[in-house]
Image (cartoon, grey):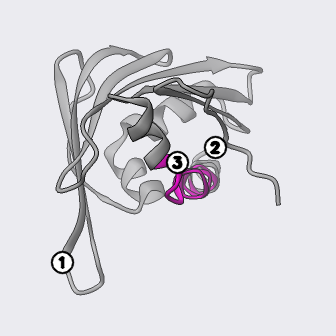
């Protein structure tokens, strides 16, 4: 089955361009990235903090069935324009990957469809390529599929 989330990784560049069109109105797609209770559902994580504002911060944590924390991530929100864009850092704790910079842009395609474009900048080409060897693309596509399913119920 074809992945709906597209990842463009040009050779010798330390960035990714990720795009996905959703069968969701723009406001609902943006809400899926900014409402803690919705983020927790589609990402399958606990939202510790999500301050949707310039100079705000965020923190997510995922535990296994026994309650052991297996994933922690955090960052700072540098720019926040409702229904348009979020610029933030993303850092996985206890991982070899350094902080990355993410530019998320939300755009309306029609009154019932919208598009997300994520421009992610890594510290180096080697680090970006190392991340791409992980099941990153598959995981992101699955998360976006869950986002679509969960937010569809809010329509």
Give percent across and percent down for residue 101: 34, 25
Tag 3 secondary structure: helix
Question: Which quarter of the figure has residue 90?
Answer: top left
Nearest to N terminus: mark 1 or mark 2: 1
What residue is drawn where x is 45% and y is 38%?
A: 128
The front one of 62 and 52 is 62
For label 3, the residue is 132
Give percent across and percent down for residue 54: 22, 15
What residue is drawn where x is 17% and y is 56%?
A: 94
Judged by depth in the image, the label closer to the viewer, 3 or 2, is 3
CA–CA distance between discs 1 and 2?
35 Å
Segment tinted magenta in the rendering: 131-146
CA–CA distance between discs 3 and 1?
26 Å
The front one of 145 and 112 is 145
For label 2, the residue is 155
Question: Which disc is residue 46 wearing?
Answer: none
User: Is 99 located above or below residue 151 in the figure?
Assistant: above
The front one of 136 and 43 is 136
């Amino acid at each position: 089955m074809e992945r709906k989330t597209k990842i463009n990784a040009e050779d010798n560049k330390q960035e990714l361009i990720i795009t996905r069109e959703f069968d969701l109105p723009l406001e609902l797609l943006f809400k899926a990235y900014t409402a803690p209770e919705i983020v927790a559902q589609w990402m399958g994580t606990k939202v510790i903090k999500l301050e949707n504002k310039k100079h705000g911060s965020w923190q997510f944590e995922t535990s296994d069935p026994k309650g052991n924390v297996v994933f922690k991530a955090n960052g700072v929100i540098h720019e926040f324009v409702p229904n348009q864009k979020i610029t933030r850092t993303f850092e996985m704790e206890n991982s070899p990957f350094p902080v990355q910079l993410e530019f998320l842009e939300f755009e309306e395609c029609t009154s019932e469809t919208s598009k997300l474009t994520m421009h992610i900048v890594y510290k180096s080409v080697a680090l970006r390529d190392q991340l791409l060897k992980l099941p990153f693309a598959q995981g992101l596509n699955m998360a976006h599929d869950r986002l679509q399913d969960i937010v569809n119920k809010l329509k």
